[in-house]
Amino acid sequence: MSSMVVIGTGSALPERILANTDLEKMVDTSDEWITTRTGIKTRHIASKGDETSKLGSRAARKALSMSGLVAEDLDMIIVATITSEISMPSCACLVQKELKATNAFALDLNAACSGFLYSLDLAEKYIKFDPHLKILVIGAETLSTRVNWQDRNTCVLFGDGAGACIVTGTDQERGMLASNLYSDGSLYKLLYMDSAPSMNKDLIRPGNDGSYIKMAGRDVFKHAVRCMDDAISSVLDQTGVSIEDVSLIIPHQANIRILKSLVDRLGVPLEKFYINVYKYGNTSAASIPIALDEANRQGKIQAEEYLLLCAFGGGFTWGAALFRW
Ligand code: ACO
């Protein structure tokens, strides 16, 4: 029975950096408040040429280069995003055009901050069906386009960027061992983003005062910690791997306090977590693949070690996946 392995990773960040001290000049906040409540010091913000599909394509080229493949080798492109520069066609089609991946079909996946995990899970189903497939999985976001820059509750949290990986099948005893996904749409109002205003007067949503992120921070915090803890336990139970056996945990990078609470619940040292939220803020679906690429290039994941990914985001959506690298 073949399983899905990652054969290349890549990431791309816009050059422009927005520091907490810059935000102090924009809203009533302070470096001290942002640092203590979130752990974030800086975030990267897109400029012209850093559209979501462009960032995604840059990350993809690096992942392709590491994998030794070329764009024409790709059979499928999945882009996890909630911030494509256009609504139709998909961001994945724009990436396909940019890369000239002429043999691939392409689609977007919206599972907010859990989008990359959901996309890996989907890719794995295709690879189980045909282990020869070469699939490009991207998480790419320009959340700066969807943040209300007058709302200090949210504008300090988010950043832009993209990460990518190339996956295919193997007969070796490694790769993705398990992946569990969950959703609870009944809680969507705790974290959501309105669409562009409706052109159909009957379907105008009351309260849609702009297509930017709205969030009940404390509720999100509590659910994020509990749900990621549950998802991790379930994936470990399913595989019989203990948390002590896991070499590295790459969580969605939302907030250092969420991660510290998760560390306490799991009873593992903080060093087991790969953390870069202080540099990039919350890049939603891009956060796990950016961190995965950094950890991979820094040699933090060795062959045959256990790697655990976990995420939580709008929907609510959440999940965890276990790999033997
Ligand atoms: N600067 C200064 N003061 C602020 C800021 C800011 N940027 N933002 C809010 N405040 C104020 C509030 O107005 C409030 O003031 P008040 O007491 O006078 O009303 C005070 O700080 C406390 O606000 P709380 O919302 O209670 O602060 P809390 O300790 O809960 O921290 C935070 C807020 C950081 C948003 C926290 O709730 C959190 O981390 N939630 C998770 C949200 C998250 O990560 N969302 C990302 C998307 S979901 C995901 O990716 C998992």
Image: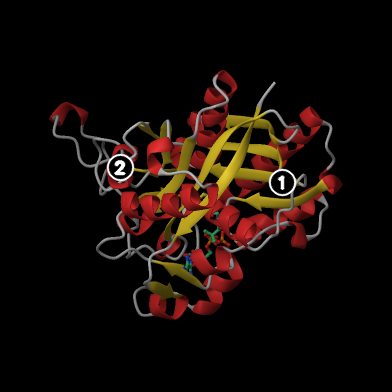
Q: Mark 2 Cα within 10 Å, few/some/many (few <14, many 20+)?
A: few
Q: Residue 169 got which mark?
A: none
User: Residue 107 placed where, x, y %?
Assistant: 37, 32
**258 vs 124: above or below:** below
**177 vs 150: above or below:** above
The amino acid type of the residue labelled 1 equals Leu
Quarter where residue 5 is shown: top right
Say whether residue 257 is left or right of residue 263: left
| Front of the two marks 1 and 2 | 2
Q: Residue 100 got which mark?
A: 2
**172 vs 193: above or below:** above
Say whether residue 276 is left or right of residue 74: right
Q: Is residue 142 visible?
A: no
Q: Nearer the viewer, residue 138 or 231?
A: 138
Quadrant where the N terminus sits is top right
User: Residue 85 placed where, x, y %?
Assistant: 27, 48
